[in-house]
Image (tube, rainbow, N blue to C red):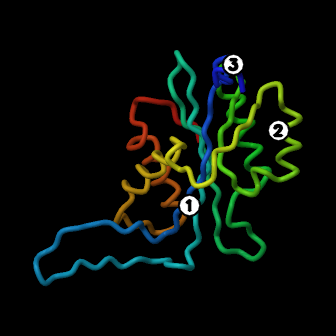
Amino acid sequence: MAAGGTAAGDLGAWICFEDETGQGLRPPRGRSWSRRGHRPEVTVNGGDHGGRISAAGLTCHRPGDRSRLIYRLHHYRRRKGERVAFTLDEYKSLLQAAHQQLPGGKIVLVWDNLGIHHSKAMRAFIDTHTGWLTVFHLPAYAPDLNPVESVWSLLKRSMVNFLTTDLDHLTHMIKHRLKVRCLGSSGHVHS
């Protein structure tokens, strides 16, 4: 990083923060109102056996440009041999999509210390793309430094007590909520 701590500014690059989240068919718990003595009950289909959707997202910022959210969804249907989390190839695809979609294409990536982020294969990918990709790691246990955490928090709060019937319905709801509730008309969303 440059002496003044402006790696993205010196490169004319986008600063992109990355993080992951996940959601199953069981909705996040929230508060509700009911008449005294009548506890509300919500019946949920799927439970622990309905699969899961993981999301990896980048919030991208550059002075003079509109902020953007670029994300990918990973479906886990609990099939034998299927990965729950994102694969190395899916992370590479997300970064290459950001490179293509962001004007200028140079990226300063800031992400957490997930094991796959430090893998030899990911390091090799980063080393072969130093012309447009510079990477910094956040300190451990510092979610308050990552703006993507706020996007995921808004998404989860918007889904409280909302029932989905299957993974396709959940996928549609996540995409809609990210577009309408989390960003509104203030930014660009690329899935």
Q: Which residue is mark 1?
A: 22
Quarter where residue 126 is shown: top right
Say which label, 2 or 1, has the lower sequence index: 1
Provide the secondary structure element on which disc 3 rests.
Answer: loop
Nearer to us in this view, 184 or 29 = 29
Q: Position of residue 168 (x, y in %)?
A: 54, 60
Toward the left, the furthest residue is 36
How packed is label 3: few (under 14 Cα within 10 Å), some, or many (20 or more)?
Answer: few
Q: Position of residue 74 (x, y in %)?
A: 65, 57
Provide the secondary structure element on which disc 1 rests.
Answer: strand
Q: Which mark is residue 125?
A: none
- Distance CA(mark 2)–CA(mark 1): 25 Å
Q: Is residue 84 above or below residue 99?
A: below
Residue found 68% across the figure and 66% down from its top: 84
Residue found 77% across the figure and 44% down from its top: 92
Residue found 43% across the figure and 37% down from its top: 183
Q: Is residue 28 above or below residue 16?
A: below
* Amino acid on which the number 1 mark rests in the picture: Gly
Q: Quadrant of the N terminus?
A: top right
How packed is label 1: few (under 14 Cα within 10 Å), some, or many (20 or more)?
Answer: some
Residue found 53% across the figure and 56% down from its top: 171
Q: Does the CB distance between marks 3 and 2 fall below 8 Å? A: no
Q: Which residue is mark 3?
A: 104
Say which label, 3 or 2, has the lower sequence index: 3
* Amino acid on which the number 2 mark rests in the picture: Ile
- Distance CA(mark 3)–CA(mark 2): 18 Å
Q: Which residue is mark 2?
A: 126
Provide the secondary structure element on which disc 2 rests.
Answer: helix
